[in-house]
Amino acid sequence: MKKLIVGLLVIGGGVLVCPAYAQVGVKKTPDQRVEKLLQEAELKYKVDEDGDFMLGNRLEGERTQLAWILSNTSQLGSLEIRQIWSIGYRSKEPIPPKIAARLLEQNGQVKLGAWQIRKMGENYVAVFSAQIAANTDVKTLLLALQAVTSTADEMEKELTDKDDF
């Protein structure tokens, strides 16, 4: 299973500042279930001020892609859901219609996850996000993480030909 995520590593410093949804000065506790799975997979990660896990995935051609695994979960009936996401596009202006249409087009082609547009701080970002069961196993977590990072990175390359995330 380690072959699915080739060299997940922590990528440091300042690529994107994500807004904190917690109270100022209060650091949230990371979900121990995720931490256990990441340790089992021997992956390096950082825990941000929201208690979420930030990882970097080294992809083909020396490209890298950041991803977040959220500690907070949501409920859908009896299903507890966790979100994994990665940024594929960022702009100071609202996402242009042509790019938004491309993201919607790709939503119909992916097997897991979907593109979302969010306002983060002063930026508008296109985030590829997948929801999985919060009590997942390591194999499923790694597969979802690979799907999210590779999809976001492919779109980043297509739209900008850069490797910012």
Image (tube, rainbow, N blue to C red):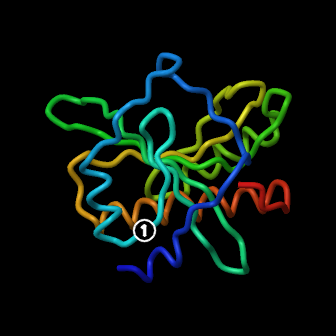
Q: Residue at x 64, y 30 (%)?
A: 118
Task: Give the camera-side residue of 10 and 65.
Answer: 10
- Report the residue that reaches farthest toward the front: 25
The residue under label 1 is which amino acid type? Leu
Q: Quadrant of the N terminus?
A: bottom left
Q: Residue at x 78, y 25 (%)?
A: 122
- Report the residue that reaches farthest toward the left: 78
Q: Residue at x 46, y 46 (%)?
A: 47
Image quadrant of residue 10? bottom right
Image quadrant of residue 77? top left
The answer to whether residue 84 is left or right of residue 115 is left
Q: Secondary structure at mark 1?
A: loop
Query: Could you classify mark 1 by the number of other residues whose Cα lies within 10 Å: few (under 14), some (14-19), or many (20 or more)?
Result: some
Residue under pointer 1:
43
The answer to whether residue 157 is left or right of residue 129 is right
The answer to whether residue 126 is left or right of residue 78 is right
Question: Where in the figure is residue 12, as x and y percent of width and height?
Answer: 66, 56
- Answer above or below: position of 164 versus 139: above
Question: Where in the figure is residue 76, as x and y percent of width and height?
Answer: 24, 30
- Answer above or below: position of 6 versus 8: below
Task: Give the camera-side residue of 113 and 51.
Answer: 51
Question: Where in the figure is residue 16, as x and y percent of width and height?
Answer: 71, 42
Q: Residue at x 55, y 57 (%)?
A: 109
Q: Quadrant of the C terminus?
A: bottom right
Image quadrant of residue 20? top right
Task: Give the camera-side residue of 75 and 20.
Answer: 20
- Answer above or below: position of 12 versus 28: below
Task: Give the camera-side residue of 45 and 122.
Answer: 45
- Report the residue that reaches farthest toward the top: 23
Question: Where in the figure is residue 103, as x and y percent of width and height?
Answer: 67, 45
